Image: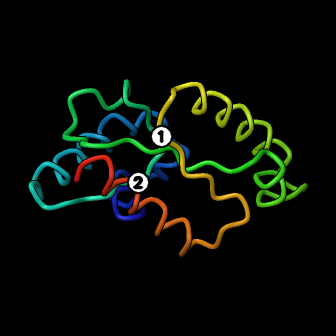
Amino acid sequence: MDAAGELAGRDIRTSPETWPRYQNIVNTIVDSIRPHPTVLLGVCTPDELRGWPVDAWVLLDCSDDERTHRLGVDRAQDLAKALSDARSYRSLGLPVVDGTGLSPEDVGVAVAALIRGSVG
């Protein structure tokens, strides 16, 4: 994202008008490395990436208490949005890896196991 932001002349994360073009760049990269296995982490839904070469979708989730703890009380505005987004993502019915109380390494192992079971 940082390199794309430099190219765009603004921060991709906070410039929604850049998102469609950024998605096109990412899609081109993902498509160019197929058929090699690729894991792409992001905040898009299946509907937002319709037509992409995606073999499996996984929701990385955690409890709302954990999310609140991770974001901290000094980010109240971000927290409200994060909790709202979490409810929306949970309603999609995707397979879930719940990272509540897990290390990043343990989450990675769980994601790999779920993906292997989905596409293997």
Residue pointed to by mark 2: 114
Q: Quadrant of residue 87?
A: top right
Amino acid type at mark 1: Pro
The residue identified by callout 1 is 95
Residue at 41% in and 54% down: 114
- Residues 22 and 35: in front is 35
Q: Looking at the picture, does residue 34 appear above or below residue 87?
A: below
Q: Is residue 18 above or below residue 102?
A: above
Identity, as a three-letter code, of the amino acid under mark 2: Leu
The answer to which of 93 and 31 lies nearer the viewer is 93
Task: State if disc 1 and disc 2 touch (CB < 8 Å).
Answer: yes
Task: Name the residue rendered at 62%, 48% in the picture.
Answer: 61
Where is residue 53? Give x, y as percent. 19, 40
List x then y, in percent, for residue 94. 47, 34
- Residue 102 in the image: state x and y as whole percent: 66, 68
50 sits to left or right of 19: left
Q: Quadrant of residue 32?
A: bottom left
Instruction: Give the SS element for disc 1.
Output: loop
Give me the C-alpha separation between circle 2 and circle 1: 8 Å
Q: Position of residue 3 (x, y in %)?
A: 35, 64
User: Secondary structure beneath disc 2?
Assistant: helix
Residue in the image at 70% along x and 41% along y: 82
Along the line of sight, the residue nearer the viewer: 70 or 97? 97
Q: Please identify the quadrant where the N terminus is shown.
A: bottom left
Disc 1 packing (10 Å; few <14; some 14–19; many ≥20): some
Please indicate whether residue 80 sits to the left or right of residue 39 in the image.
right
Closer to the N terminus: mark 2 or mark 1? 1
Q: Quadrant of residue 73?
A: bottom right
| Horizontal relation, residue 33 to residue 88: left or right | left
Q: Nearer the viewer, residue 79 or 25?
A: 79
- The crowd level at tag 2 (other Cα within 10 Å; few <14, some 14-19, many 20+) is some
